[in-house]
Image (cartoon, helix red, strand yellow):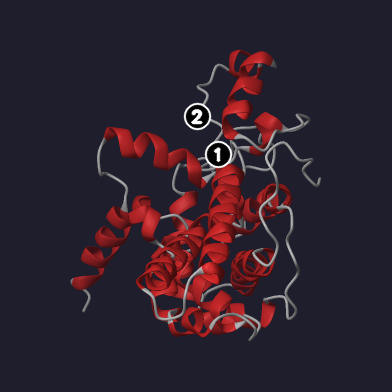
């Protein structure tokens, strides 16, 4: 057993950079969302819970597919909030890129247009697509090939949506300090370029389970009519938790050895519960929103 430990640590170290929240964290978020859904959605959705859970880590499985896929996939997982603080963001990712150029944000920080990340756009895009797929489902004939095909699309997009919502609840996906403290550092926070995997993969894998997260999920779902706004609010809240995460880490809260710290478990399970609560809300809200016809092109957008 003693000889196996270095091998285990090597496997953890190699696997860590591959996943955001770690595969276990994403599975927990999607499963907690399924277990807290209201009971007024179509039965096929409930029957698809195992697939919805499995799809939680899926966008991380796409990594390494090739240069084109990696270029578009990577930035969808995060938003470095410090770069855009004070800007009024449009809901269109291409207008967002235009704003970054015209506001001088890219030149001021010396970064590319993809360096800041597109997390809220990916969440809003998938949520809007899911709403439209629910409308197609309502319009399809029961038992038809059309309905069965739309159901497959709904499950696929709902499960994948869970990945990006979970990422947005992870504080290190909402900050320029994503893998080490790069701002002035009088408190001596970690800058060893390992805190990201130490927190979201290694610590979650050994110390946090579904039973820790479920009691912290909001008991009553909230209707989310502004998908982009809800995503931005969650990312802002995640950004506000960054220093607390670093402080817990500084005090040894995410250490690999020894009993898991209560502070570490409480903080991590709370953030996972935030992701699960929001994902549950998005799933349910897209279903409810599909009762109404789509907004006319050019009609005002609710803020």
Tell me: 86 left or right of 45. right
- Quarter of image, res 13: bottom left
Marks 2 and 1, how far apart in space? 8 Å
Dots 2, 1 in contact, CB < 8 A = yes
Q: Residues within 10 Å of mark 2 (few under 14, many from 20)?
A: some
Q: Which residue is mark 1?
A: 118
Looking at this view, is 69 or 149 the one in front? 149
In the rendered image, residue 222, in percent from the top left (x then y), is placed at 75, 69
* 194 to 106, vertically: above or below: below
Q: Would you say residue 254 is visible in this rendering?
A: no
Looking at this view, is 91 or 248 the one in front? 91
In the rendered image, residue 98, in percent from the top left (x then y), is placed at 61, 21
Q: Residues within 10 Å of mark 1 (few under 14, many from 20)?
A: many
Q: Secondary structure at mark 1?
A: loop
Q: Secondary structure at mark 2?
A: loop
Q: Quadrant of the N terminus?
A: bottom left
Residue under the image location 28 percent in, 33 percent down: 67
Q: Quadrant of the C terminus?
A: top right
Residue under the image location 52 percent in, 63 percent down: 136
In the rendered image, residue 113, in percent from the top left (x then y), is placed at 52, 24
Tell me: 214 left or right of 74. right
- Quarter of image, res 276: bottom right
Q: Which residue is mark 2?
A: 114
Residue under the image location 61 percent in, 16 percent down: 101
* 301 to 157, vertically: above or below: above
Residue under the image location 51 percent in, 29 percent down: 115
């Amino acid at each position: 057993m003693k000889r196996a430990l270095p091998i285990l640590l090597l496997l953890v170290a190699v696997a860590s950079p591959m996943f955001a929240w770690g595969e276990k964290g994403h599975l927990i978020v999607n499963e907690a969302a399924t277990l807290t859904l209201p009971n007024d959605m179509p039965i096929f959705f409930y029957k698809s819970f195992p697939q919805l859970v499995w799809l939680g880590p899926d966008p991380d499985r796409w990594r390494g597919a090739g240069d084109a896929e990696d270029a578009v996939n990577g930035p969808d997982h995060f938003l470095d909030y410090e770069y855009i603080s004070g800007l009024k963001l449009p809901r269109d990712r291409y207008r967002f890129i235009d704003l970054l150029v015209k506001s001088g944000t890219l030149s001021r920080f010396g970064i590319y247009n993809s360096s800041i990340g597109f997390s809220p756009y990916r969440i809003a895009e998938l949520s809007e697509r899911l709403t439209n797929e629910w409308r197609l489902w309502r319009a399809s004939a029961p038992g038809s090939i059309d309905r069965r095909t739309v159901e497959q699309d709904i499950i696929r997009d709902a499960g994948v949506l869970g990945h990006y919502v979970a990422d947005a609840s992870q504080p290190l996906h909402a900050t320029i300090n994503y893998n080490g403290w790069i701002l002035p550092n009088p408190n001596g926070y970690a800058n060893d370029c390992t805190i990201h995997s130490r927190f979201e993969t290694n610590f979650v894998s050994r110390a946090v389970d579904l039973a820790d997260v479920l009691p912290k999920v909001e008991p009553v779902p909230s209707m989310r009519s502004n998908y982009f706004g809800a995503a931005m609010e969650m990312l802002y809240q995640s950004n506000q938790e960054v220093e607390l995460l670093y402080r817990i880490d500084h005090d040894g809260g995410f250490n690999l050895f020894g009993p898991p710290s209560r502070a570490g478990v409480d903080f991590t399970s709370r953030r996972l519960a935030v992701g699960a609560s929001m994902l549950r809300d998005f799933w349910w809200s897209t279903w409810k929103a599909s009762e109404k016809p789509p907004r006319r092109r050019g009609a005002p957008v609710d803020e």
